[in-house]
Amino acid sequence: MIWTSFLHAVCLTLCAPPLQDAVVVEQPQEPEAPKAQPAVVPVVPAADLRLHAERVYTGTGEILKNALIEVRDGKISSLRPGRSAPEGVLQVKAVTAGMIDLSARLHSNFNSVEQSTEVQPHLDVAGSVDLHDKRFARLARTGVTTILVNPLDRNVIGGRGVALKTHGPMEVEARRLNGRPILRGAIGSEPSAANHAAFGRPTDFYSRRPTTRMGVEWEWRKAFFDAVAAKRLPEKDFPGAEDLREALAGKRTVMIQAWTTQDIRTAVYLDEEMQREGFGDLDLVIDAGAEAWKEPGILVRNSTIVVLPPHTAGGRVGSDGAFLAWNTASLLVGEGLTVCLSAHGAGPGSATLGHQAGFAMRGGLSFDQALAAVTSAPASVLGLSERLGTVHEGMDADLALWNGRPFAATSRVTGVLIDGVIVVDPR
Amino acid sequence: MHTNALLLASLAFVASAPTSASSSEGDALAIRAEKLHVGDGTVIENGIVVFEAGVITEVGKGAPVPKGVVLIEHAGHLSAGLIALREHAGAVGESNDSTRAVMDEADLSYAYRPNHSEVQGLLAEGITTFVLAPRPGSLVGGLCAVAKTGSEVISRRAYLSICTGANGLTSNRFPTSLQGSQAELERRFSWPQGVFATAVKGELPVMLDGGSSRTEVQHAIAFARRHGLKGILVGSTRLGEMAAKIRAAGLGVALSSYSPSTGRRVVEGAVALAEMQVPFGFALGSPNNHPANLRLTAAACIRGGLKSGEALKALTSTAARLAGVGDKVGSIQVGLAADMVLWSGEPTDPGSRVMAVYVDGDEVFRAEDDENGDDK
């Protein structure tokens, strides 16, 4: 707690400029429509919800002042700046798109990873998501409106992830966001953590490879090689082979947890080997890539997207003791890489995704870059840019309502809309 | 014990404590109770039940007692023997084969030990029939048996036991995950063979242990609907919250035992299920739960608003119907087995005691202090 307060203080002093902005789009007031117009008045149904914001950070570099947002059927039906607040309308200081966390980790722990074999590309984590888990509501309260849930990283290839809003129908299939499919796996010490050599212990299925990082890497390569072989030899087919081939064909994003330099290397080299073999080109996302800053070049040459883990005061993150520097996000963005931030599902009272954006700004990221890293960039990874990540007419009405400049240490999310529903009411 | 002086039987055997009474060798026997609970909700004042060769032959207020038949006067209540859905008595170590996740042909009747002390302990609480089910820990645990307490197995295919939730997982064999479990069960039920095909046809009910959480129960109900399965849900204290969905799926429920930590949910669940007219009985799960818990759970539900008659039905006739043995046990009706409990008072009143228990017409239990004529 002490260092968290410290971070807040640092943020307050270093990265919280007053509410003044680079790009302000001022639009003239539309003239009032003439009053008495009989006969052909178009019948426009009343908006489900209207709110007025002093500033709307659209996510495309614009800041709309005094904007009136109308919501209908869960979408933003109208967004008009330069309006005075009509009486009785919900008024807020600032609005951003709802934040998106690609590594929220709201799985059901060991019930969410099928450990009977290391490679389970065909299993969908959706079956083990517990929407009644209070962590969903807690996360929504921090302004995170969409998350990607992945299996627990105890397998080499854990299976399919599922993108979900943090509020909505209480059935996963009804809430599932059908964007770009995600195949989740891990490189590092975690996939081999439970495995052991056979002798000296009772025999069970944990007596198996991998017990080392080398074994983990071997399992990845074997899985892809086997999937390619099974295409030619149907008798070698196995569950999940098609998922792996789809990944090689670029139809499925491969999201690999790799904290340290060596594990990030392994992931990229795996992709490059697949390309050399002519098997395909993985659409690669490194999750928890804390040490991506050490060798950004290999990520640049492979156009790899990086999801960073939450910052810590000492910089050490994850079970492998990877080092995440304050300026990691800034450095990677400076290299031209797409970076997403994550709070690993931290709820209110801890370092939330909004705080992570503030920390990254302390490390040099601009406001717009930080906003993108928690909204439009992850929306793009999920293949949902048409619906999520920016504030525009026609987009899902997933909004974070702030009581001041977003990500500033003195600001917080005071209200949340998800699909046009007020999940957290700021009033 | 207060004894009614009026005797109608030709042989005036006036006793509240016969040393032993039996009808199984062909000797008919009759009992008159101050209140006779038939099992369908009706109560007959001073009702007489006559049984011979283990089967009830006459029931009614003025039921004729054949000449030469002993009439036992019982100054208290009489009901059918209680039925515990999902029970492990005497078979804890034998009722779950952990080597494989799917034991679709495992037959629980082979795990039944009628003379086990845990089984005998059920009789002292008026439980005359129970569903012997596998302990959780497998995806498919086997075929549940319905056993008479201390006596015969009367059904070997009451349910196919399935865990769709976390209760079916173990960490050292497939599956270790919910998604793995779901994939396996979907495979088994989408291209059904053997008992799975029978279950999909609706000919073999399932005992679905969804797990404890609401999400797991949702999955279980959806699973049953997807494959058109009939049967009961067990294993969660959340079932009452989903009464409407359970009703829509045409399923029944075996309510979990009352405990101080989950009691409110069990109690409110029973009330909700009764309101939605979802058929339900009570699971016991002895020896982890004391056999008395069956009736104490029902009493707790009554305290929470469940009608006493509904509670007794859940303990007897509804449970019998859910277990597929309603034509054999669960009611005081002509043609059904003479499985009865003589109570000191209202059967669902926790202050009432079991005075005597009959299984197939045999007196198999009698309260010891009854001999002193002291029921307090």
Image: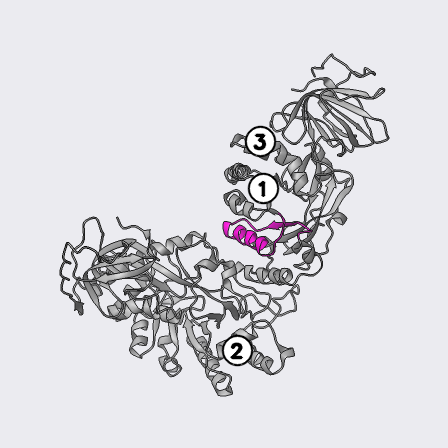
Find the distance from the CA under tag 3 to the CA under tag 1.
13 Å
Quadrant where the image shows the C terminus of chain B: top right
Left or right: A391 in relation to B275 = left
The range drawn in magenta is B202-231
Q: Is residue A403 visible?
A: no
Mark 2 and mark 1 residues within 8 Å of each other at the beta carbon: no
The residue located at (53%, 30%) in the rendering is B303
In this view, the residue farthest toward the front is: A39
Left or right: B352 in relation to A387 = right
Front one among B113 and A427:
A427
Mark 3 and mark 2 residues within 8 Å of each other at the beta carbon: no
Does label 2 lie on the same chain as label 3?
Answer: no
Q: Amino acid at mark 1?
A: Ser
The local crowd at label 1, few if under 14, some if 14 to 19, many if 20 or more residues have their Cα within 10 Å, is many
Is disc 3 placed on a helix, strand or loop? helix
Is disc 2 placed on a helix, strand or loop? helix
Q: Residue B256 got which mark?
A: 1
Q: Is residue A347 above or below residue B13?
A: below
Q: Residue B375 got which mark?
A: none
Q: Amino acid at mark 3?
A: Ala
Q: Residue A245 got which mark?
A: 2
Q: Is residue B77 above or below residue A309?
A: above
Q: Nearer the viewer, mark 2 or mark 1?
A: 2
Q: Amino acid at mark 2?
A: Arg
Does label 1 lie on the same chain as label 2?
Answer: no
Q: Is residue A357 visible?
A: yes
Chain letter of mark 1 equals B
Query: How far across and how far down the image is residue B166, in percent?
Result: 56, 54
Mark 3 and mark 1 residues within 8 Å of each other at the beta carbon: no
Front one among A154 and A426:
A426
The residue located at (60%, 40%) in the rendering is B280
| Residue carrying label 3 | B299
